[in-house]
Image (tube, helix red, strand yellow):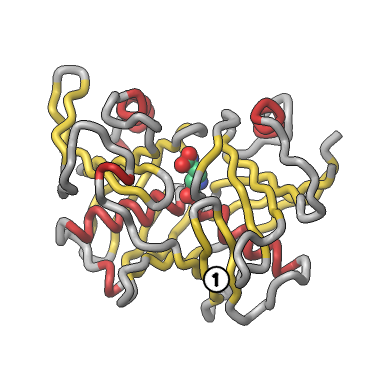
Amino acid sequence: MRFSKMHGAGNDFVVLDLRDGRAPPTPADCARIADRHFGIGCDQLLTIEPARSAQAVASYRIWNADGSVAGQCGNGARCVAAWLVRAGAAPAQGAFSIDSPTGAHAVQRNADGDFVIDMGAPRFAPAEIPLLGFVQAQDAYPLELDGRVLAIGAVSMGNPHALLEVDAVETADVAGLGAALQRHPAFPQSANVGFAQVLAPDRIRLRVYERGAGETLACGSGACAAVAVLDRRGQVHAADGVTVELPGGVLRIQRRADGHLWMAGPAAFVFEGEWS
Ligand SMILES: N[C@H](CCC[C@H](N)C(=O)O)C(=O)O
């Protein structure tokens, strides 16, 4: 089966074209493809499939490296958009729409050639994250972890996110705290755990310990989640745009008048291949 290897700010993907209706790989196949020694290697596998909504040019689905299914992938959405343009299935400069597992997303192109994706409105209601043990949305939730009570932000971008503020991302215990929070009973569907350092109202640094993949070099929905939580706390001004510096690259997130977060960033092709 032919595949494309791509990345968005270092978050890397194997992309499969299933628009002919072929069945998607099983979770076990996804994990094998994602394996960086016995397979091709990627953080997530993306399948491109026929559109599910009338206005979209195609739809996509997302599997993490461990074979688990995800509801959203921001870096993956930009790579899907770039893939569709190169395949001639979407306009190179105009706007179009793609269907993610959790809804349709408008796609635009900015002057730098980056893809700009409408990632939708953040969902803060605990029931939508999901987050157990709380009813009302809060700026931070007191969660006990290893005998300490941490103030955790939580939000859904179509997938669950937790957020910890840190003084310096370099020294954050990303793997330790990330894995522990993913196992916390408050997150019944686990979570992508972001570690954010606020530099200014328009600039943050972020590392993300992703559900089903571990720490990645970038997480698009995680960048949106961090900006959403910090914006709600008044620590960044998302309406003016926030630059999110991740280990693999830079994303720009802006809240528009309708409350949706639009994410701009790169999408790169690395190579094409044949999966036997
Ligand atoms: N690990 C995520 C899916 C990939 C998200 C990330 N790669 C992005 O760019 O948003 C989850 O299980 O919800």
Secondary structure found at label 1: strand
User: Does residue 215 sit above or below 77 in this rendering?
Assistant: above
Q: Which x, y percent locates residue 240?
A: 28, 74
On-image quarter of the N terminus: top right
Q: Which x, y percent locates residue 266?
A: 55, 63
Q: Nearer the viewer, residue 76 or 187?
A: 187
- Residue found farthest to the top: 147
Q: Amino acid at mark 1?
A: Val
Residue 130 seen from this side: yes
Q: Which corner quadrant of the image does residue 108 belong to?
A: bottom right
Q: Which x, y percent locates residue 12?
A: 60, 46
Position of residue 22 in the picture relative to residue 154 (left or right): right
- Residue at image point 76% right, 50% down: 18
- Residue at image point 31% right, 28% down: 181
Position of residue 11 in the picture relative to residue 235 (left or right): right
Residue designated by label 1: 107
Position of residue 249 in the picture relative to residue 236 (left or right): right
- Residue at image point 60% right, 64% down: 53
Q: Nearer the viewer, residue 3 or 61?
A: 61
Q: Nearer the viewer, residue 118 or 202?
A: 118
- Residue at image point 63% right, 53% down: 60
Q: Which corner quadrant of the image does residue 80 belong to?
A: bottom right
